[in-house]
Amino acid sequence: FTSIQHRIKAAIKEEAAFRQELLLAIIMFPTSFWLAQDLIHWAVLVSVLLLVLIVELLNSAIEALTDRVSTERHVLSGRAKDMGSAAVTFSLLIVGIVWGVSLYIKIFD
């Protein structure tokens, strides 16, 4: 368990994007209790927040490994980094959709 804590602390220290997304999750988490209609809905709201953090950690790992292998520009290195960033973008889109629909239902239903 301490190994996991160490790795999370390293991500917080070294990765600005992870810090931003973690802050977003921390802010949105309490809101999930107000927004959720039931326990399953709450689980979905929280799960998509965790999904963003997971995808960001994987993206950071890809970037770190790519930089470790070589600092010179290479088309495959750039592609790997771009795909990782695209995955983060899609995970944030999922959050926007799930939370947006939930907010719409809460306000207009």
Image: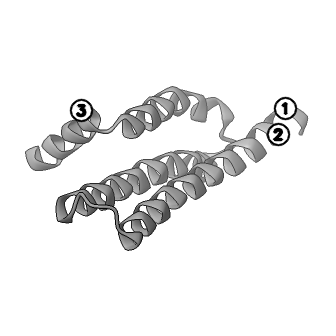
Q: Residue at x 41, y 51 (%)?
A: 56
Label 3 near label 1: C-beta < 8 Å?
A: no
**Along the line of sight, which residue is nearer the eye, 29 or 74?**
74
The scheme the figure's colours follow is: one colour
* In-image side of 57 versus 89 (left or right): left
* Amino acid on which disc 2 is placed: Tyr
* In-image side of 88 versus 71 (left or right): right
Pointer 1 local density, CA inside 10 Å: few below 14, some 14–19, many at least 20:
few
Q: CA distance from mark 1 to mark 2?
A: 5 Å
* Amino acid on which disc 3 is placed: Lys
Residue 70 sits above or below residue 92 on the image:
below
Q: Residue furthest left?
A: 2
Q: Position of residue 13 (x, y in %)?
A: 24, 32
* In-image side of 90 versus 75 (left or right): right
Instruction: Say how many tags the image has.
Output: 3
The circle on residue 13 is: 3
Quadrant (top left, top right, bottom left, bottom right) of the C terminus: top right
Q: Which residue is mark 1?
A: 107
- Mark 1 and mark 3 lie on one chain; the one further toward the N terminus is 3
- Mark 3 and mark 2 lie on one chain; the one further toward the N terminus is 3
**Along the line of sight, which residue is nearer the eye, 52 or 75?**
75
Q: Report helix, strand or loop for mark 1.
A: helix
Residue 42 sits above or below residue 84 on the image:
above
The circle on residue 96 is: none
Q: Position of residue 15 (x, y in %)?
A: 32, 39
User: Which quadrant of the structure image shows residue 84?
Assistant: bottom left
